[in-house]
Image (cartoon, helix red, strand yellow):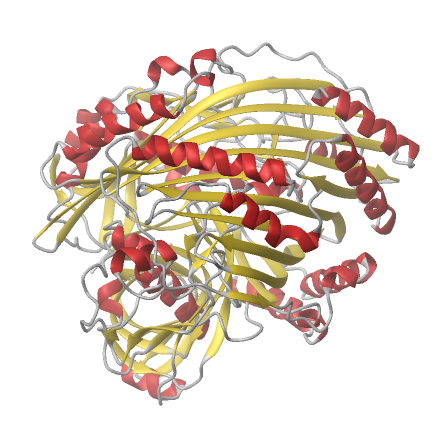
């Protein structure tokens, strides 16, 4: 049975049982993955998973139930479970209603037949090439994974939403380690794409092997104030961490966001603009509709340093009186956790806009600093406090990179970090629609031995 | 549908359908779980949810290469098809240059791990569960105006696995986890502080029935509120005392993960090649014991059907044992010790800890403070992570206290610590006598989230990097 037809039958059943509003989210995913360990292929994995997550509302009370089988009997059973739960649950006064049907954007590059047709042999060739290139460096040991996902998602509700979408993606990671006389150097990188023409690990693995070697000889640095030069991956993951919490409409609604009440106010330098683009062609988090069937869109979160939008879903948008930005998702939860959770607002493809500096200029102008590589600085929990270990970093002195750093921690806050950005790189790394440049942050406290 | 009584037979039939060489291996694992969750935030019951997950996992080790697949039903035809996919993948990997894996053939079990509950949470009415969460959440907010947000997340899971393998293992094992987590957010004049704690265990609904949920809620709310007035922490290399919850996180993250034999074999642990070597002072003994009843990391059999047993990781400062699966035991030539756990039927068994504990010494907290002289006392963990390859770890604490001239003094906020795994146990200067399994956690590894517990006594350590905002 087509999944939208299955959804329609489920919604009819919910209405018959007395649900005032109901929604069904359906997912059918196939995953083919290969893993290499100690520089050799080791494991192949082929998984298919299905899920229907049903939300039923009766007088503002929510019941949620799910099934991991997409047949009519199981889905109707989940509907019955959700209705029963809703009858036993007190009403949620914040709930106003599920989203209504809308006009959906056309999003290019979500499904690539070239990716969908790849088999284990094709993946093995890509992974093997990556492993070989990385271990071309003397003494480098490689751990690698590659995974191809083909998925079909649909959302339907009793207000008339009925949409579905199909997508493919390929994700891979390479981790390198080298050991010499008890000294250890490590580095890692990842590939994410929806385009089979980008399905190669060769150059990425070559660079990762080189970087692992460059981390040999790490030394402690003195505690004190440093400028941080953050590479593109550190920048992207730090901004994701900040906006997952403080940028979420749900956190604002719950009184947990330190950015609450700051819409329209400056929170960073004028050079800082961050876009959340849910519809960029080929974006890893792009799609026409979110997990509730609201249209996805491109919108500024921070524009020239000013906070412009919180990320919302229908629940938080209605409760806060803000626009629904179409950011409802369960993507950040493990599969079994998704089956028992409402979607929540979270970033889609974040794009930190480029500035004026070259990487070399950012480093050359730094008297005393640390270059962070794949070392994100997310805030702790819901607080604005940042206290993070430097996973991979180099000491910069008088504009020159000196040596890798061992056992050091960064301590600052999100407002300080954003306001102290004093340089943004002019080129960005693009990971399937997620984009970020190098940035430099001045006067950050670093604790070490 | 394959009837429940027939799962072992279904598994045996599927296994017998595969042609195996002398070093080959296959297994089938049937998985089923029932979960209920209730979420209450800021006085609103936002969600009640129920979930039933059922499926089967098939693994094949052929020619030294692994294949893994799954089925979302227990139908013999679907499980058989999953095994065929696993076999095909194993052969595809084996046809290329590959790591040559072998499993231990020493662990063959037939048995049943019973559901160890006095009150099965599946039989508890939803209204009662909602009532518990509402009372706890109300107690958090009842602390006063400083608490701006409160959340209680209650969940209970009953889980069953039936494991059949080509070596002859035939095991059925049950587990139950109940967790009621409280989170308070206090803020004042632009400053925000969080506090969190939980009532949690590997028993039935009695976990909640025997606890005072309102007292726990108040405790969390009060901690968040009082942190608003705490001092900023000092930073740099200093002497510390960790409370049992920090010790639990430390021993789990920094040491336990490094003791997992898959990371040792993959050359991703600082403990590689150190068995029999000194890794800590003589006062340190560390165990990982899934057989302690009722804790969050307790289980009778692992997800490969190996009977769980107590593992002595460090004895009087000497590294004694790693945590093993059938594979790592086979590759390292030792006996399996029941450390392979899987999140669900969509996940391969991966080496995980159960209950990881530092055994007690003979010092009181006051004596430890005197031993430290000047430093910081870290209390109530707020998470952390480790890079096992380089042995570098990081943890944050919810609160800390300055130690001056051997006495525990003023409270500080947002304090974190970072260090090197191999230095901390070597630099331990005192071991408390007050053992508490104070870290009920959910551990993530390779995308799988598994219930665990950790703990120990207070520990005094010199020369740890401490920092904060």
The image quarter in which residue B430 lies: bottom left
Q: Give the answer, above or below, for where B135 lies relative to A105.
A: below
Q: How many marks?
A: 0
Residue A353: x, y in percent?
Answer: 39, 21
Residue A430: x, y in percent?
Answer: 36, 21
Task: Residue at 46%, 16% (x, y): give it.
Answer: A282
Image quadrant holding the C terminus of chain B, namely bottom left
Residue A94 shows up from this direction: yes
| Residue A418 placement, left or right of A372 | right
Residue B317: x, y in percent?
Answer: 24, 77
Q: Nearer the viewer, residue A249 or A23?
A: A23
Image quadrant holding the N terminus of chain B, namely top right
The image quarter in which residue A395 lies: top left
| Residue B179 placement, left or right of A157 | left
Q: Nearer the viewer, residue A175 or B305?
A: B305
Task: Residue at 47%, 19% (x, y): give it.
Answer: A283
Residue A173 shows up from this direction: no
Q: Give the answer, above or below, for where B438 lies relative to A320.
A: below
Residue B400: x, y in percent?
Answer: 42, 69
Q: Nearer the viewer, residue B341 or A228?
A: B341
| Residue A210 placement, left or right of B263 | left
| Residue A270 placement, left or right of B35 | left
Q: Nearer the viewer, residue B254 or A176?
A: A176
Q: Give the answer, above or below, for where A191 lies relative to A395.
A: above
């Amino acid at each position: 049975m087509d999944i939208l037809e299955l959804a329609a039958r489920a919604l009819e059943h919910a209405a018959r049982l007395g649900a005032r509003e109901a929604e069904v989210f359906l997912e059918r995913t196939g995953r083919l993955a290969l893993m290499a360990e100690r520089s050799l292929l080791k494991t192949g994995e082929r998984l298919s998973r299905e899920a229907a997550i049903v939300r039923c509302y009766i007088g503002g009370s929510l019941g949620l139930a799910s099934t991991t089988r997409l047949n009519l009997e199981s889905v109707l059973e989940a509907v019955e479970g959700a209705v029963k739960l809703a009858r036993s649950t007190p009403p949620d006064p914040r709930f106003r209603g599920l989203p209504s049907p809308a006009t959906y954007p056309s999003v290019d590059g979500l499904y690539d037949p070239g990716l969908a047709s790849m088999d284990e042999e094709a993946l093995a060739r890509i992974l093997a090439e990556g492993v070989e290139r990385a271990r071309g460096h003397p003494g480098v040991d490689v751990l690698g994974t590659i995974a191809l996902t083909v998925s079909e998602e649909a959302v339907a509700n009793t207000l008339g939403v009925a949409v579905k979408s199909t997508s493919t993606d390929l994700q891979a990671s390479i981790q390198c380690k080298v050991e010499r006389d008890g000294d250890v150097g490590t580095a890692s990188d990842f590939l994410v794409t929806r385009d089979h023409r980008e399905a190669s690990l060769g150059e990425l693995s070559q660079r990762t092997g080189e970087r692992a070697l460059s981390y040999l000889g790490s030394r402690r640095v003195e505690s004190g104030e440093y400028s941080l030069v953050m590479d593109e991956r550190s920048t992207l993951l730090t901004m994701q961490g900040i906006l997952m919490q403080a940028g979420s409409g749900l956190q604002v609604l719950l009184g947990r966001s330190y950015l609450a009440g700051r819409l329209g106010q400056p929170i960073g330098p004028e050079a800082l603009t961050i876009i959340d683009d849910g519809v960029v062609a080929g974006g890893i988090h792009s799609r026409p509709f979110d997990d509730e069937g609201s249209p996805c869109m491109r919108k500024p979160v921070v524009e020239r340093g000013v906070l412009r939008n919180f990320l919302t879903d229908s629940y938080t948008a209605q409760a806060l009186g803000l626009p629904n930005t179409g950011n409802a998702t369960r993507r950040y939860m493990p599969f079994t956790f998704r089956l028992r959770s409402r979607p929540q607002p979270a970033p889609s493809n974040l794009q930190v806009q480029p500035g004026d500096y070259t990487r070399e200029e950012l480093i050359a102008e730094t008297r005393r600093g640390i270059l962070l590589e794949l070392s994100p600085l997310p805030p702790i929990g819901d607080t604005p406090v940042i206290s993070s270990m430097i996973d991979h970093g180099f000491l910069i002195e008088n504009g020159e990179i000196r040596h890798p750093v061992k056992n050091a921690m960064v301590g600052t806050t999100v407002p300080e970090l954003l306001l102290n950005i004093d340089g943004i790189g002019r080129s960005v790394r693009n990971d399937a629609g997620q984009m970020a440049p190098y940035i430099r942050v001045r006067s950050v406290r670093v604790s070490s031995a | 549908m394959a009837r429940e009584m027939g799962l072992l037979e279904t598994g045996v039939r599927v296994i017998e359908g595969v042609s195996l060489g002398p070093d080959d291996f296959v297994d089938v694992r049937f998985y089923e779980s029932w979960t209920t969750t209730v979420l209450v935030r800021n006085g609103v019951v936002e969600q009640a949810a129920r979930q039933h997950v059922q499926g089967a996992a098939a693994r094949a080790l052929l020619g030294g290469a692994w294949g893994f697949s799954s089925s979302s039903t227990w139908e013999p035809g679907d499980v058989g098809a999953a095994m065929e996919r696993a076999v095909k993948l194993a052969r595809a990997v084996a046809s290329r240059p590959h790591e040559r894996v072998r499993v231990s053939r020493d662990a063959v079990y037939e048995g049943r791990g019973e559901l160890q509950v006095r009150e099965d949470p599946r039989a508890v009415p939803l209204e009662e569960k909602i009532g518990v969460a509402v009372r706890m959440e109300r107690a958090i907010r009842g602390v006063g105006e400083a608490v701006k947000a409160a959340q209680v997340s209650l969940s209970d899971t009953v889980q069953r696995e039936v494991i059949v393998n080509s070596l002859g293992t035939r095991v059925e094992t049950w587990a139950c986890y109940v967790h009621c987590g409280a989170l308070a957010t206090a803020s004042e004049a632009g400053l925000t502080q969080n506090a969190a704690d939980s009532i949690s265990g590997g028993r039935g609904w009695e976990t909640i029935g025997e606890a005072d949920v309102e007292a726990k809620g108040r405790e969390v709310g009060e901690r968040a509120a009082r942190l608003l007035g705490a001092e900023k922490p000092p930073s740099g290399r200093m002497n510390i005392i960790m409370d049992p919850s920090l010790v639990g996180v430390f021993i789990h993250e920094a040491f336990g993960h490094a003791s997992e034999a898959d990371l040792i074999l993959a050359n991703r642990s600082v403990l590689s090649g150190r068995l029999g070597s000194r890794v800590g002072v003589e006062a340190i003994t560390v165990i990982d014991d899934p057989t302690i009843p009722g804790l969050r990391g307790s289980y009778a059999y692992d997800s490969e059907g190996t009977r769980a047993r107590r593992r002595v990781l460090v004895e009087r400062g000497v590294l004694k044992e790693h945590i093993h699966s059938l594979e790592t035991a086979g590759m390292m030539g030792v006996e399996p010790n029941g450390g392979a756990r899987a999140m669900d039927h969509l996940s391969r068994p991966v080496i995980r800890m159960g209950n990881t504990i530092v055994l007690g010494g003979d010092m009181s907290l006051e004596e430890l403070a005197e031993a430290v002289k000047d430093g910081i006392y870290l209390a109530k963990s707020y998470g952390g992570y480790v890079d096992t390859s380089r042995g570098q770890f990081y943890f944050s604490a919810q609160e800390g206290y300055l130690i001056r001239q051997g006495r525990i003094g003023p409270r500080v906020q947002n304090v974190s610590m970072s260090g090197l795994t191999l230095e901390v146990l070597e630099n331990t200067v005192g071991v408390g006598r007050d053992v508490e399994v104070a870290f009920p956690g959910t551990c993530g590894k390779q995308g799988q989230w598994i219930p665990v517990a950790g703990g120990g006594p207070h520990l005094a350590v010199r020369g740890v990097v401490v920092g904060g905002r």
